[in-house]
Every structure is written in structure tokens, then in C-alpha cells.
Image (cartoon, rainbow, N blue to C red):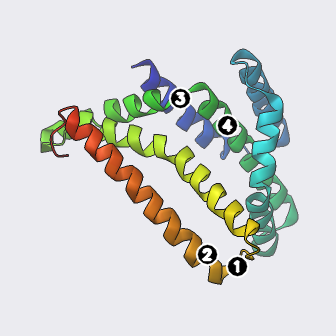
Amino acid sequence: MKNSVLFLSFILYATFIFFINNYVGLLIIFLLNVVAMMTFKVKVMGAIESIVKLLPFILLTVVINCLLANYQYAFMVAIKLTLVCQITYIYAKTTTVKGIASTVKNLCIPLRFINVNPEDIELLVCIALSMLPIFKQEYNQLKDACLAKGMELNIKNMKLILTKLLVSVMKRVNEIEASMIEKGYEEI
């Protein structure tokens, strides 16, 4: 239940940021984010690196808003996006995969009325979220192998990389399926 309250608070907080239309309010939100980082002992450099990785998306949004609206509005949107990315990073670092899966299960409890099992959804979410780092690792290994062979990373070679990645992922999925069958899980 605590995870569900935390998740809903996070969603409301992130949504609330987009309704603030002055710089003083955004400064207060920034200070609240910094306090949250200190409270939950989240590394500041990790948050900065996360925002730097998302910078192309933020800049693209700024350019589009400059073209469609004006530069002041575009700057405000950039600040809001940065603050939402910051609080999302804090939430991601303070919540476990099991916690997120449990939250999704709790939010899906009303689906029991239409014969949907929330425990099955929890298991699927947990497996899906656990696979993301594996996808990233597999992709980086394939990319490094291609670079070591002197292949350039372009659209033509992406087909080869994605095909090998898909084969690798399917092998992992088969391993997970065999493990679940051995542990007695019925078909989901």
C-alpha cells in the first residue's frame, strides 16, 4: 500500500509541475527536488548525468516550442521537463522493481471484477522491468562487437544488430519460461 501511495504521489507531483506558470514556483519545485535527493540519499551526479542523457529530447522540445509559440514559453517547458526528469530519476532510484510491480498489482485489483488476476500482472511487470538492464547489456555487447569488427553503426547494420538482439532476448525468454514451468506456474 505504501508503494501505491508513493507512486500516486509521484504521478500527481510530476503532473502538478506542468501547471506551474511562474519561475518562483519552479524554483520552489527545484528546491523540493533537491531536498528529496538529500532525504533519499540520491547521488546528485547521477541525476545530472540522467538529465544530460535526456538533453537532446529537451532541446528538441524547446526548438519545437520556439517555432510554435515563443522562446519564453519554450524555456519554461524546458525547465518543467528537466524538473520532471529529476523527480523521475529520484523515484526510480528509491523504488525497487518488486516495489513497482507490487504497485501495479495494487492498482490492478479492481480488474478482478473482469477476471483479470493482478498477481499475474505483477509477475509480468516484474519480469519486464528486470529484462530492461539485460536488453541494454546485450545491445552494448553487440554494438561493441560490431565496432571491434570494424562495422559502422548505421541503419543498414542496425538490422543485423537488432536481429541478433532479438535472438538473444528470445533465448532469455525461453530460459525464464522453463524456470517458471519448473517452479509450478501455470500458463499466464
Q: From this viewpoint, is residue 25 visible?
A: no
- Amino acid type of the residue that numbered disc 3 sits on in the rendered structure: Ser
Looking at the image, is mark 3 or mark 2 earlier in the sequence? 3
Label 2 and label 4: CA atoms lie apart by: 29 Å
The image quadrant where one finds the N terminus is top left
Label 1 and label 2: CA atoms lie apart by: 6 Å
The residue carrying mark 3 is 9
SS category of the residue bearing label 4:
helix
Tags 1 and 4 touching, CB below 8 Å: no
Q: From this viewpoint, is residue 105 visible?
A: yes
| Rendered image: mark on residue 89 | 4
SS category of the residue bearing label 2:
helix
Label 4 and label 3: CA atoms lie apart by: 15 Å
Q: Judge whether 30 appears above or below 40 on screen.
A: below
- The quadrant in which residue 56 appears is bottom right
Residue at 60 percent across and 25 percent down: it is 94
Tags 4 and 3 touching, CB below 8 Å: no
> How far across and how far down the image is residue 117, in percent?
19, 38
Label 1 and label 4: CA atoms lie apart by: 30 Å
Q: Judge whether 89 appears above or below 63 on screen.
A: above
The residue carrying mark 1 is 154
| Rendered image: mark on residue 158 | 2
- Amino acid type of the residue that numbered disc 2 sits on in the rendered structure: Met
